[in-house]
Amino acid sequence: MVSQQHLTEVVGAVHDPHLPFGLAEMGMLERVIASPEVVQVVVNVPCHHCPGLQILRDDIETALRTAGVTQPIRISFQGREAWQPVSMTPEVRAAMRTMGIQTVTSRSIEEGAPV
C-alpha cells in the first residue's frame, strides 16, 4: 500500500481545473485518508456548482491510480469548513495578482470585504 503522506503529496499536486496551481497551494486539500479498503479524499472547493468539479474528480483519481492506488477512491467536495481565499499560499496570491486575478487578504476579510 502506498503511504498516506505520499498520496497527500500526489493529490496536493493536482491542479485546480481553472488555475495553474496545485490543490495544496490553493489551500483546497483538506485531507487524504488511506486504508487497505479505501482512499478517501476531501477537497474544499470555492464553488460547489463549479463545472470543473468532474474534471477535478477525474484528475484526482487519475493521479492516485498512477501513484499505485488499487482500492476504491472516495472523493468529497464537502469539507469541514468552507474554502477561503486566505487558504492560498502567499506565492499563489502574488502569482494570481500578476495574472490580473483579484485576491483577498486576511485583513480585507476582517474588514468585511466580499470573499
Image: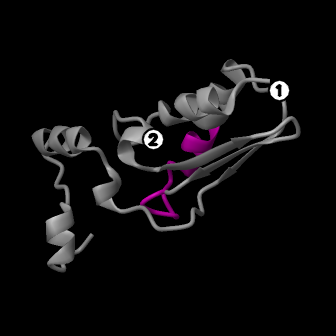
Q: Is residue 53 magenta?
A: yes
Per the image, the residue denoted by label 2 is 23
Residue 40 showing in the rendered view: yes
Residue 71: x and y in percent read 84, 33
Left or right of residue 37: residue 98? left
Q: Mark 2 Cα within 10 Å, few/some/many (few <14, many 20+)?
A: many
Left or right of residue 89: residue 81? right
Query: Which residue sits at x=15%, y=42%?
Result: 94
Q: Secondary structure at mark 2?
A: helix
Q: Is residue 85 magenta?
A: no
Find residue 24 and report its image quarter. top left
> What range is drawn magenta here?
45-58
Q: CA distance from mark 2 to mark 1?
A: 22 Å
Mark closest to the chain's N terminus, 2 or 1: 2
Query: Which residue sits at x=45%, y=62%?
Result: 47
Question: Residue type at mark 2?
Answer: Leu
Q: Mark 1 Cα within 10 Å, few/some/many (few <14, many 20+)?
A: some
